[in-house]
């Protein structure tokens, strides 16, 4: 039998292959593909069976799938699973029969939607707002919660003070748990320390350190004192730190002496000093303190106040709480203020799309330098869940052991992390059964990697989540009430809508995606750019005459209501008169066994002419061979998997792809490198 032989070739012995194939055939005779696959996932396909076998079985089960229904699902919710979600509770309360109705209402009546979301999350006010939205100044600059007075930190402590707020883990396997009461006490001591040091409302205070329990307390302490956090990624070098400190006019900085990553000690405080940072508060590193402090700098224990009670200061909902920065892969990064309302947006996405509920445990490898750091704080604490933080690299087995031992229920990833797990099989044998959902953001996902991720937890969904710092969350996402297909999205996020337009500005299934304002969380100001020029100038009108906002992502609409990201619009290339995206080309090359990862760029030839396709490739471990052989393998994969008219001009082998600190591939840097010769 062909099927049995296939399973043998993928690692099963003859008897096991025959038994499994017979069971699959039996189930297919009795059930539709979705039900058949669910039964197999629940009772037959465990992680003890090689992952390639799972892929082959899925392919067989859905062999006759009607493609206009959309891509083949890998997870579909049962009725019981649907009814356990926050979304179902909202739909039942409002009388909506399906998610589509709920989304339409959320954008047609934003005042009503945000009133419900705010009430469900018990957002606290010192003075309740006069309304949810004042759009009299136009959709580009709406006022959310006008007349209200609040401090979002009040809403972060709605859980029982004895419940767990933060779990910290290390590569040694040690876990430390901190309660909501302990977190609030430390945040209050931070706020008193700021007051004693003479800082006042509106002062910008930088944080450049790993995501730790202390970092969370520092963040909350700064916000509740009505100062503004300046977020700096702990991986940045001194020049990048200096740029961000200057852009935000930071008056002080919190950092740590050093960090330890994969066994290597990396200086932190020394970089801050080299950057010419202002007054610094310095925490000890894992190995104590190595660097002597500058005059005027202060050790953590000296800085902290002793009073563990503090009343968060009331502010306008539109006041700044955080300055974050875009990746800045070329030139100066955009400096983007977050407000108290931005935090509400992040928490709402966590509540509704990631289904974070009281007592859940949320892990997302990140730090305060990237939007997912603040997002993790607000989405977890406002929804009365637990933040799970790991103090080392997330690409190896120790991180997986932490996820298992901490009882993580929602795990967020960057796709490159999952790729590393799949290539090394480092998560084999771990128990991820507590995970209810994954989420993936930061770059375009691979279908193979996300399928593998789902299988690690006995097939739980991946919520693809795409947005940005200037949104405070996502604009396109998935849910736990809709089927999940690896590397695809199912809906615009609640409270926001978008349009996909072609180059002529007409509605299309493939093209540039534009946002439809207003929506809570969308930025209205940049510190160092003209906001209207960046996001609105030159945008076409929507199909119904609506104002559109530029975001820069390239998307395609699939059958069945699904969407797939094709990368950034500026990573779209014209090959022989045919439009293609870097992400599409890289996806087609994933099956080339000799290659670990690729980046596709288009470069014009000297003297002009059509773009030429150049592939930068990182080879799999131990792989050699000539450039010509590699190019032939890739050309075959590209011709069969995407378009035979796309011709690879050159393959350049590279040790590692250049990435931002948030793991986005810097294709512009590769393009510049290639053009320079």
Image (spheres, rainbow, N blue to C red):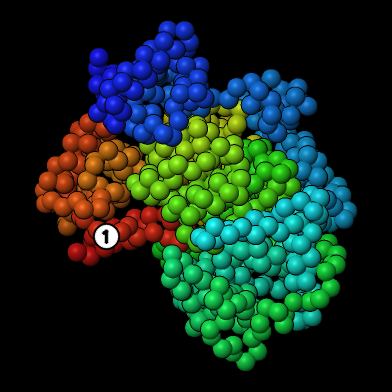
Residue at the spot 75% in from the left edge and 66% down from the top edge: 187
Q: Quadrant of the C terminus?
A: bottom left
Q: Quadrant of the N terminus?
A: top left
Quarter of image, res 358: top right
| 19 over 477 or under it: above or below | above
- Of 175 and 273, which appears nearest the observer? 175
- Residue 483 pos. (x, y %): 53, 26
- Residue 317 pos. (x, y %): 77, 55
| 354 over 104 or under it: above or below | below
Quarter of image, res 377: bottom right
- Residue 542 pos. (x, y %): 54, 36
- Residue 394 pos. (x, y %): 47, 55
Can I make out residue 146 in this image? no
- Of 502 and 63, which appears nearest the observer? 63
Name the residue that disc number 1 marks. 655
Can I make out residue 77 in this image? yes
Quarter of image, res 114: top right
> How many labels, in total?
1
- Crowding at dot 1, Cα within 10 Å, few <14 / some 14-19 / many 20+, comes out as few
Residue at the spot 59% in from the left edge and 39% down from the top edge: 434
Residue at the spot 28% in from the left edge and 19% down from the top edge: 4
């Amino acid at each position: 039998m062909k099927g049995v032989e296939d399973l043998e070739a993928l690692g099963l012995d003859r008897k096991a292959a025959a038994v499994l194939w017979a069971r699959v055939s039996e189930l297919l005779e009795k059930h539709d593909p979705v039900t058949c696959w669910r039964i197999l996932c629940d009772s037959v396909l465990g992680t003890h069976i090689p992952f390639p076998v799972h892929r082959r079985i899925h392919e067989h089960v859905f062999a006759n799938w009607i493609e206009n229904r959309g891509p083949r699902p890998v997870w579909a919710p049962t009725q019981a699973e649907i009814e356990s979600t926050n979304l179902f509770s909202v739909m039942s309360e409002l009388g909506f029969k399906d998610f589509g109705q709920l989304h339409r209402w959320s954008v047609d009546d934003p005042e009503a939607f945000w009133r419900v979301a705010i009430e469900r999350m018990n957002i606290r006010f010192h003075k309740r707002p006069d309304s949810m939205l004042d759009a009299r100044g136009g959709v580009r600059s709406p006022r959310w919660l006008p007349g209200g007075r609040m401090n979002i930190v009040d809403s972060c402590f709605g859980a029982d003070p004895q419940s767990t707020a933060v779990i910290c883990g290390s590569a040694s396997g040690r876990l430390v748990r901190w309660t909501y009461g302990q977190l609030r006490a430390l945040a209050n001591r931070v706020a008193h320390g700021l007051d004693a040091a003479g800082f006042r409302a509106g002062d910008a205070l930088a944080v450049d350190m790993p995501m730790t329990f202390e970092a969370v307390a520092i963040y909350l302490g700064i916000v509740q004192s009505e100062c503004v956090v300046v977020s700096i990624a702990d991986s940045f070098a001194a020049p990048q730190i200096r740029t961000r400190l200057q852009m935000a006019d930071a008056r002080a900085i919190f950092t740590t002496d050093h960090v330890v990553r994969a066994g290597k000690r990396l200086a932190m405080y020394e970089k801050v000093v080299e950057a010419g940072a202002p007054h610094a508060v310095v925490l000890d590193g894992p190995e104590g303190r190595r660097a002597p402090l500058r005059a005027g700098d202060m050790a953590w224990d000296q800085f902290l106040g002793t009073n563990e009670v503090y009343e968060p200061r009331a502010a306008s909902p539109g006041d700044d709480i955080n300055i974050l920065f875009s990746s800045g892969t070329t030139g100066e990064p955009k400096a983007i203020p977050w407000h108290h309302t931005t935090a509400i947006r992040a928490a709402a996405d966590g509540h509704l799309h990631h289904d974070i509920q009281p007592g859940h445990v949320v892990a997302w490898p990140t730090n305060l330098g990237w939007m997912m750091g603040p997002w993790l704080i607000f989405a977890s604490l406002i929804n009365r869940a637990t933040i799970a933080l790991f103090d080392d690299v997330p690409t190896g087995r120790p991180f997986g052991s932490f996820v298992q031992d901490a009882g993580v229920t929602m795990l967020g990833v960057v796709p490159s992390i999952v790729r590393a797990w799949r290539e090394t099989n480092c998560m084999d044998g771990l128990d991820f059964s507590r995970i209810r959902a994954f989420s993936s953001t930061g770059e375009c996902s691979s279908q193979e990697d996300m399928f593998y991720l789902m299988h690690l937890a006995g097939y739980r969904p991946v919520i693809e989540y795409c947005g940005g710092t200037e949104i405070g969350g996502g604009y396109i996402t998935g849910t736990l009430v809709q089927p999940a297909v690896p590397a695809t999205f199912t809906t615009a996020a609640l409270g926001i809508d978008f349009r996909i337009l072609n180059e002529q500005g007409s509605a299309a299934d493939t093209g540039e995606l534009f946002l439809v304002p207003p929506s809570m969380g969308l930025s209205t100001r940049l510190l160092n750019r003209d906001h209207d020029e960046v996001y609105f100038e030159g945008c076409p009108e929507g199909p119904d005459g609506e104002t559109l906002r530029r975001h820069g992502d390239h998307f395609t609409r699939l059958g069945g209501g699904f969407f797939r990201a094709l990368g950034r619009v500026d990573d779209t290339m014209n090959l022989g008169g045919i439009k293609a995206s870097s992400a599409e080309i890289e996806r087609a090359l994933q099956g080339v066994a000799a290659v670990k990862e690729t980046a596709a760029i288009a470069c014009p030839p000297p003297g002009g002419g059509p773009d030429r396709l150049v592939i930068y490739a990182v080879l799999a471990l131990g792989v050699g061979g000539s450039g010509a052989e590699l190019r032939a393998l890739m050309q075959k994969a590209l011709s069969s998997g995407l378009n035979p008219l796309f011709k690879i001009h050159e393959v350049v082998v590279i040790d590692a792809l250049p990435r931002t600190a948030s793991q986005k591939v810097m294709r512009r840097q590769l393009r510049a490198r290639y053009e320079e010769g």
